[in-house]
Amino acid sequence: MSQPPLRIAIVGGGIAGLSAALGFVAAQKAGANISIKIYEGAPAFGEIGAGVSLGPNAQRALKLMGAGEALDRAAGEDLDDPGSWFDFHIAEASHAKAGEFICTSALRGHLFARLGLDLTTQIAKYSEWVAWRGLIPRKQFHEAMGPNARAKMMHCGTGRHILHFPVRSGELINIVAFVRDPEHLKLGHNTGPWTEERPHSEMLQDFASFTPECKALLQAIEKPSIWGIFALPPIHNIVDERCIIIGDAAFGGSGAGQAIEDALFISKFLSHDSVSSATPLERVSAINKALEAYALLRHPRGLDVQRTSKEAGLLYEFMGVNGEGSDMARLKEGLESRLVWIWEYDEEKVLQQELAKL
């Protein structure tokens, strides 16, 4: 007699939620005894005028979930070489010399209470950063930056930096321009993450010290939008016997790459035969074992990525962590020590080791 499937509900259809669904569907096609439902409050999926960059670790995770061909099509010729991610450029004239309930976002407050987390302290707080965002055709990018300009580049300045990279098979260039806001002048009356269109003049004033090429790049954005960046304090628990929090719901500020990694591991753990095909009497114990293994593996890494992501942001903007300032040699060393260990994470090897224990 066949066992009933393990029923999995995914709450939130963002990057973490849909990546987890991708992993579960791949497992389902391979014969895993699971069923999946996604709950999302938005009436439809659509573009929001922004893109995300994926490091080599996130790219490998997507491939391990069966999305390799789709990733190659979307990335086109710009798919990352693991040995090179972004080039860095000093853009300021003053520096010119150098059955389970997986929560991904929605209902996070209810899940936090269930996990015994203090809702008065586990509140997303303004990071004192905002991001200007926009997408432009590749032709306009080269008109602004020059015919031989690299599509993937970080332009660094004091208290601000511009990141751009190709999306949609290289047809468009995604632009994200970060600005520090320590006096909360950009925040206004907002109390949580927000986005709104704002005039070019404000954005250009924020980057008045940058090169003419960088300012031309920003001017090319048809309707620039500003995004308030909020971050969660470190979280001390991400699972109980029925619920898991993944992605930004758990480690706000750690980015899309960690959300995709979380999705890979939770989909592999819960679809493992020892869990999904366990008898009803054995299943609770099997689920608890899988979730405990997941938390022991992912919680420390998520916290480390959350911390080092903030430190990397300070380095990009010459604000330093250990007095690096605009010293490019020290910046390179500081960024490598904080980012390479993330990008070189061997998901496949770790999965093999962990799944063998279930």
Image: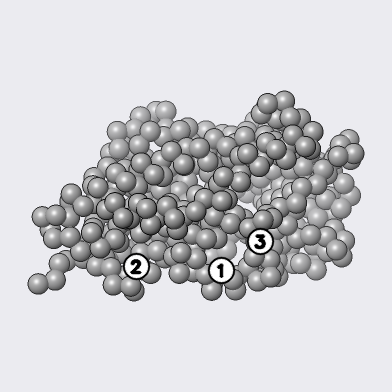
**Residue 198 drawn above or below residue 119:** below
- Work out whether residue 215 or residue 155 is closer to the camera in this orientation and state it: 155
The residue that mark 2 highlights is: 27
Residue in the image at 24% along x and 47% along y: 289
Q: Which mark is residue 58?
A: none
**Which quarter of the image is occupied by the N terminus?**
bottom left
| Disc number lying in front (3 or 1) | 3
Residue drawn where x is 41% and y is 34% of the image: 235
Q: Earlier in the sequence, mark 3 or mark 1?
A: 1
Label 1: how many Cα within 10 Å (few below 14, some 14–19, many 20+) = some
Q: Identify the residue under disc 3.
A: 81
Q: Secondary structure at mark 3?
A: loop
Indicate which disc, 2 or 1, sits on the residue closer to the N terminus.
2
Closer-to-camera residue (45/82): 82
Q: Is residue 158 visible?
A: no
Q: Residue at x 56, y 51 (%)?
A: 344
Find the distance from the CA under tag 3 to the CA under tag 1.
14 Å
Residue 191 in the image: x percent, y percent?
Answer: 53, 35
In the rendering, at what x and y percent does residue 350 appear? 42, 52
Classify residue 296 by image quadrant. top left
- Give the amino acid at mark 2: Ala
Q: Is residue 344 above or below residue 26?
A: above
What residue type is disc 1 on? Answer: Leu
Question: Please, is residue 317 above or below residue 137 in the view?
Answer: above
Depth check: give the residue in front, 254 or 175: 254
As helix, strand or loop, the secondary structure at mark 1 comes to helix
Q: How packed is label 3: few (under 14 Cα within 10 Å), some, or many (20 or more)?
A: few
Query: Disc 1 marks which residue?
Result: 71
Q: Amino acid at mark 3?
A: Asp
Residue 275, how many percent across, how many down? 23, 58
In-image side of 229 versus 143 (left or right): left
| Image location (x, y in percent) of residue 352 | 38, 57
